[in-house]
Image (spheres, helix red, strand yellow):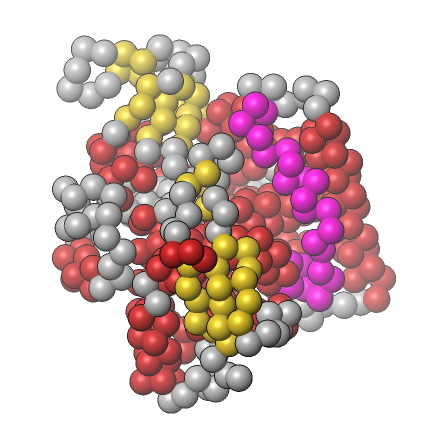
Amino acid sequence: MVTCLGTEGNNFVFNAKLADASAEEAYKSLTVPVFGKGVVYDVHNSVLMEQKKFVKAGLSVENLRAYVPMINMETKNYLSRWNKKSDIQDVHKAMAELIILTASRCLLGDEVLAQIFHDLDGGFKPVNFLFDDLPLPSNKLRDKAHIKMRHFFMDIMKSRRETGRTDSTDVMQYLATNCQYKSGRNLTDIEVAHIMIAILMAGQHTSSTTSAWVLLYLARNPDWFNKLRQEQINILGSLDAPLTYDSLKQLSLHDNVVRETLRLRPPILQIIRKVVHDMPIPGTNYVIPKDAYIQCVPALSARSDDYFENAEEFNPYRWNEFDLQNKDRDEDLVDYGFGALSASARSPFLPFGAGRHRCIGESFAYVQIKTILATFVRTFDLELLNNKFPDCDFTTMMVQPKNPMVKYTRIDC
C-alpha cells in the first residue's frame, strides 16, 4: 500500500487513469456480496457511470423538494419516542435508526424496510477486502439478508406494476420505469434491486455517522443550539414554519455546521485503488508496481492548519471565508457520464470524493442531514454525558463515535 498525502496526493489517487488504477478491483470483494452482481463495482466502469447517471436523475431537485416534508415527518415521529422531559440516549444508535427510516421512505416510497439492514450491514468487515467468502457467521447472515432484500424490492416493483401505481417520487420508481442503457437495454428488476441496496447501504453508514457527530459537536458546544434556532427564526419567521427544500437552502449556518462536522469527522478516512498498470509518481523516479494498492487520506488535509486556521477547532463560521476565497476559482469541468464535475481533486475538503467516483448522493445527504438537524434543534437541547466527547472507533469501516451517550432536554415542555 502506497499512501499519497496532501492535496496532490488526493488528486493523484482520485484522478488516476482507469488504465492505471481501479476502484472496482479494490472494493469488489467487499461490496459485491452486499450489493449484488451486475451493479457498481461488479461491472465495467463505463456501465457504472451509466448507473450513476440513472440514480442522479432520480435524485432530481423536484424529488428532493418532495423528500423534505417526508424526512421532517419521519424525524418528528421518531423523536416522539424521546418523550421524557430529560433522559439519556445513544445518539449514534438513534441516528442509525432514523437514517434508515428517512432514506427508505424517500428512496423506496411508503414501503419501509429496516429489519434486515443489520444482517446485511454485517458484511461490511475489513477482512472481506481480502476474503469475501469466508464461512463466517456474519457472512452467512449477510448472504441471507441480501436475498431477502433483493426479493423485497422486486416484490414492490411487481406489485406497483400490477396495481398500476405510477405516481411515486422515489428513486426506485424512476429506475424501474425511466432508465435505459446506451445499448438500448432497460434495467432489469434485479439490477434495480441491487442498485437500491447499494444506495441505501452506502448512504446509511455515512449519513448516520455524520448525523451522530453533528449532534455530538453541538452537545459539546451547546450554545450552538440557540444559534441554529435563531437562524430559523430570522429566516423562516418561527420555529413552527414548515421546512421546505427552498427554506433549507437559506439556512446557511445549518449547512456550515454539517460541513464543519464532515471536515473534522469524515466518515471515510481513506480512498483505495488497486494498481493495474505500473504508475510513475510525477516528479520522482519512483514507480508504483502493478498489483500494489494506493490510497489517499483526505481527512488529513481537511484537518491541516495549512488549509484551515486552528484546524482542530469546531468553527462553522470558517466556511463563510472559505466560500469567499473559492467562489471565483476557475476549474475545468469533466463529465464522466453523470454530469459535469470539477476535474480538480486538489481541494483540502473532499468528504464526498472527487473525479469519476465522486458520490452522487451528496445533494440528498445534505437535504437529509440538514432536515434532521433543523427538526432536532426545534425540540431538544443536548449535553454530553459526563462532559466526555467520544473517541473515534477506528475498528469499524466508518469512523464511528465510541459510547456516544448524550443527555437530552425537551425545550417545549
User: Which quadrant is home to the N terminus?
Assistant: top left
- Tell me what residue is drawn at x 61 percent, y 56 percent: 97
In this orientation, which residue lies closer to the viewer: 340 or 312?
312
The correct choice, above or below, for 252 with respect to 325 in the image is below
Compared with 224, 273 (above or below) is above
Query: For residue 76, which quarter of the picture?
Result: bottom right
On screen, residue 271 versus residue 180, left or right, reads left
| Left or right: where 124 falls relative to 61 | right
Q: From the viewer's side, name the closer residue of 114 and 40.
A: 114
Q: Position of residue 81 (x, y in %)?
A: 64, 70
Magenta region: 103-128
Q: Indicate the position of residue 310 as horizontal and vertical percent values.
A: 17, 50
Question: Which residue is most to the right?
Answer: 162
Residue found at x 56% / y 37%? 40
- Number of callouts: 0
Q: Tell me if I can see residue 35 in this picture.
A: yes
In the picture as drawn, the residue positioned furthest to the bottom comes out as 237
Place of residue 24 in the rendered image (x, y in percent of width and height, measured from the top left): 51, 28
